[in-house]
Amino acid sequence: MSAAARIRPLDLFTREEWERLSARNDWMGPLLVLHAWAIIAGAMALAIWQPLLIPVAIMVIGARQLGLTILMHDAAHGALHSNSRVNDFLGHWLCGAPMGSHVVQYRNYHLKHHKYAQQPEDPDLGLSAPFPITKASLRRKIIRDLTGQTFLKQRRNQFANALGIGIKPTKGNINRSQSAREAVIPMLITNAILFGVLAALGHWWAYFVLWLVPMATWMMMITRLRNIAEHAVVPDNMDPMRHARTTLANPLEGLLLAPYWVNYHCEHHMFMHMPCYRLGIAHKALARKGITDRMEVQHGYLSVLKVAASKPASVAVAA
């Protein structure tokens, strides 16, 4: 196995600069988690008050649900809090579990992605390898996302694994079933609590319309867009500055597509333990040094999608 090439931070920054950029603030991680839930609660409250706002609320809530998975991702890197127990509690119970994820399981998987980014051993390579695709193929994928088909398929597989359905009784698959249960049970617990709170407030329906629908539709689509933007059709799988992409997002994209600086993915791979709230600062520091000219940086998600869906339809038919 050949690990992906790495960047030494001190080759780009002075020690003093790096210490400032990599410093963690134990208030910021918890505050970001609180911020995500506050946005979700506020969007729910507005949609309950004025049902005409439900479509907008679905997009805002779905983006913050993705935000919760991003903050869980930060916890997987130990970046939400310097205390490992606090870090994992926040990342698991307040971020990952409501979304059906388990921070420790995710960490074990995700660190392999960083070690072997865009190499044959990368467990996430399947997310980027098929690109570029045709516009029609991308359109079909987005339709499946927005109609809940992707969500239902993922959850069906997750619950089937948790129950051991369709899994042959080998030692490895027993571990797979146990791992699925470790994620499913906290998901059921946290979602039951959320449903109970909304029911107690007299709005039980909001759990389905304003929690499950965003998760099953908008979050699925923007998760796909995130995956495409991060590694699809990058220019050089061997260059640590060009095997991941930073997509400069405008404020609307930040609100509805790319919360919590997730768009600075090239910086994240260059400095994988840097807290998410430092990534934008790091990008500006690199820009001042002229280093971003050597990185894979695109302006806006639309420009990335145009490249990702640039395969001619005639080629696809011939293939």
Image (tube, rainbow, N blue to C red):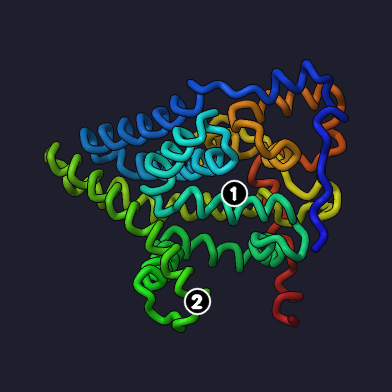
Give the residue pinned by disc 1. 226
Distance from the alpha carbon under mark 2 to that under mark 1: 34 Å
Instruction: Where is residue 273? Give x, y as percent.
Output: 66, 36
For disc 1, the neighbor class at 10 Å (few under 14, some 14 to 19, many from 20) is many
Residue nearest the observer in this picture, 161 or 104: 104
Residue nearest the observer in this picture, 232 or 133: 232
Instruction: Where is residue 151? Give x, y as percent.
Output: 42, 62
- Which residue reaches farthest top? 16
Instruction: Where is residue 312? Give x, y as percent.
Output: 74, 68
Q: Which of the marked residues, 2 or 1, is nearer the chain's N terminus?
A: 2
Q: Quadrant of residue 137?
A: bottom right
Left or right? Give the position of 159 relative to 307.
left
Secondary structure type for disc 2: helix
Name the quadrant of the N terminus: bottom right
Say which amino acid is labelled 1: Arg
Give the residue pinned by disc 2. 171
Name the quadrant of the C terminus: bottom right
For the point 51% across and 55% down, the residue is 105
For the point 56% across and 55% down, the residue is 224
For the point 51% across and 35% down, the residue is 84
Left or right? Give the position of 215 relative to 103.
left
Residue nearest the observer in this picture, 247 or 81: 81
Left or right? Give the position of 276 relative to 154.
right
Q: Quadrant of residue 61?
A: top left
